[in-house]
């Protein structure tokens, strides 16, 4: 499945650069590592994607080969970088509400006929951010990103009830914990004429779990007949289970999401039956932080045509739902912090491009 964004910018937060990588302070046990000639972690780099991607860098002792690493107990492949002898392991998918999670990375290689493990290296997004925040020469735009990121992480933790006793922004000052607000713009609109009426978009929403994703609700003609909805079912599918019957009805239906009205480089997503409702839903891939205020174009397709196009986005959700009666206080704080984070990332990106 393709990513939802055709411009997949991963902002890099760099510490002091050495050969294009991020170098962090290693523990006081470095000398022991060198003396024992073990594989050694020498730096990390964090990329802001739809959530977070971490790159661990390590070097091998003399005669070392066949490198890999354990990251939280799972083997990850290592690849050599452009710098000879420097290897990289990529760890993806750290959720926005998991900035305090301690990721344990152990570099491994072979020397002669033995496997050698280096000392464990512990990483968290919060630790990474705080190391940057204490630097005196930190550019203001990057500082804004880090503060906004930690506030968003804390708000997501409270909303999802994840380690609420250990919040991502616990080490920020009271002033930094104040999340800025602004007027939020809605771009909700329907465009074009439907060329089929078997599948129609009925509602759009946003879900923030591992990342911020668009959630679209779709009605299919005949869905009220499905046995999973208490109907009589379709006679030709009586041999199928209720769930299989629901999946069969949506077999040739899909949703397209693009950042342009012509649906160039559109991403395709399947429909999933909601068992507690008559309708189906589509959940997109994650939206990158620098695009929280962008518009997206959504349509449902069948072999015979397309639905009307819905224009929607993350900021539209916030503008239309911030004061809704069913929005909890935790939900309000989270979406406000989400937009503040997106604004900060976009401002940082524009500064870097200037």
Image: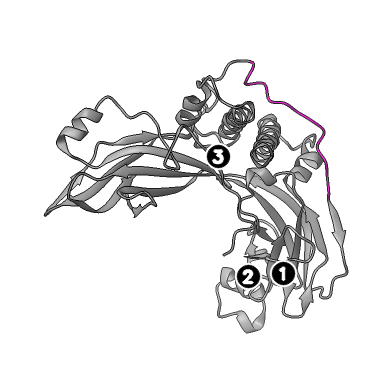
| Label 1, label 3: how far apart the Cα atoms are | 35 Å
Image coordinates of residue 104 in percent, x first then y, are 34, 38
The reply to whether residue 353 is visible in this rendering is yes
Query: What residue did someone put label 2 on?
Result: 246
The front one of 223 and 258 is: 258
Estimate the spatial distance between the alpha carbons at disc 2 and disc 3, rounded to whole Å.
33 Å
Q: Main secondary structure of the magenta part?
A: loop
Secondary-structure class at tag 2: helix
Q: Label 3: few (<14), some or many (≥20) within 10 Å?
A: many
Magenta-colored stretch includes residue 180: yes
Earlier sequence position, callout 1 versus callout 3? 3
State the separation of the CA atoms marked 1 and 2: 8 Å
- On the rendered image, what quadrant is the C terminus found in? top right
Q: Magenta span covers which residues?
A: 175-187
Residue 126 appears at what percent x and percent y? 49, 30
Q: Which mark is residue 96?
A: 3
Left or right, 139 with respect to 306, comes to left
Q: Earlier in the sequence, mark 1 or mark 2?
A: 1
Few, some or many residues within 10 Å of mark 1 (<14, 14–19, 20+): many
**Are the two marked residues, 1 and 2, in contact with CB atoms closer than 8 angstroms?**
yes
Question: Please, is residue 241 above or below residue 22 in the view?
Answer: below
| Residue matched to label 1 | 223
């Amino acid at each position: 499945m393709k990513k939802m964004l055709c411009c997949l910018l991963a902002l890099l937060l760099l510490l002091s650069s050495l050969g294009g990588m991020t170098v962090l302070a290693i523990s006081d046990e470095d000398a022991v590592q060198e003396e024992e000639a073990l594989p050694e972690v020498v730096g990390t780099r964090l990329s802001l994607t739809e959530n977070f991607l971490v790159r661990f860098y390590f070097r091998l002792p003399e005669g070392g080969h066949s490198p890999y690493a354990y990251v939280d107990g799972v083997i990850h492949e290592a690849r050599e970088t452009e710098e000879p002898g420097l290897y990289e392991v990529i760890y993806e998918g750290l959720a926005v509400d998991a900035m305090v999670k301690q990721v344990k990375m152990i570099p491994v290689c072979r020397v002669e006929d033995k496997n050698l493990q280096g000392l464990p290296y512990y990483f968290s997004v919060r630790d990474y951010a705080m190391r940057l925040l204490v630097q005196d020469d930190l550019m203001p735009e990057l500082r804004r990103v880090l503060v906004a990121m930690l506030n968003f992480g804390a708000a997501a933790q409270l909303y999802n009830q994840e380690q609420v006793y250990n919040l991502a922004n616990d080490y920020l000052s009271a002033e930094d914990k104040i999340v800025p607000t602004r007027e939020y713009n809605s771009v909700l609109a329907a465009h074009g004429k439907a060329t089929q009426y078997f599948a129609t978009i009925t509602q759009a929403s946003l879900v923030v779990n591992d990342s911020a994703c668009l959630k679209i609700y779709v009605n299919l003609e005949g869905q009220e007949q499905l046995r999973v909805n208490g109907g009589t079912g379709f006679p030709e599918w009586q041999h199928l289970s209720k769930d299989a019957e629901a999946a069969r009805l949506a077999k040739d239906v899909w949703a397209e999401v693009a950042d342009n009205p012509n649906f160039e480089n559109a991403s395709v997503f399947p429909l999933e039956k909601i068992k507690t409702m008559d309708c189906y839903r589509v959940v997109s891939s994650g939206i990158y932080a620098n695009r929280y205020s962008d518009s997206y174009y959504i349509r449902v397709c069948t072999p015979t045509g397309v639905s009307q196009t819905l224009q929607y986005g993350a900021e539209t959700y916030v503008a239309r739902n911030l004061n809704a009666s069913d929005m909890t206080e935790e939900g309000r704080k989270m979406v406000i912090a989400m937009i503040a984070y997106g604004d900060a990332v976009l401002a940082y990106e524009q500064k870097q491009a200037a």
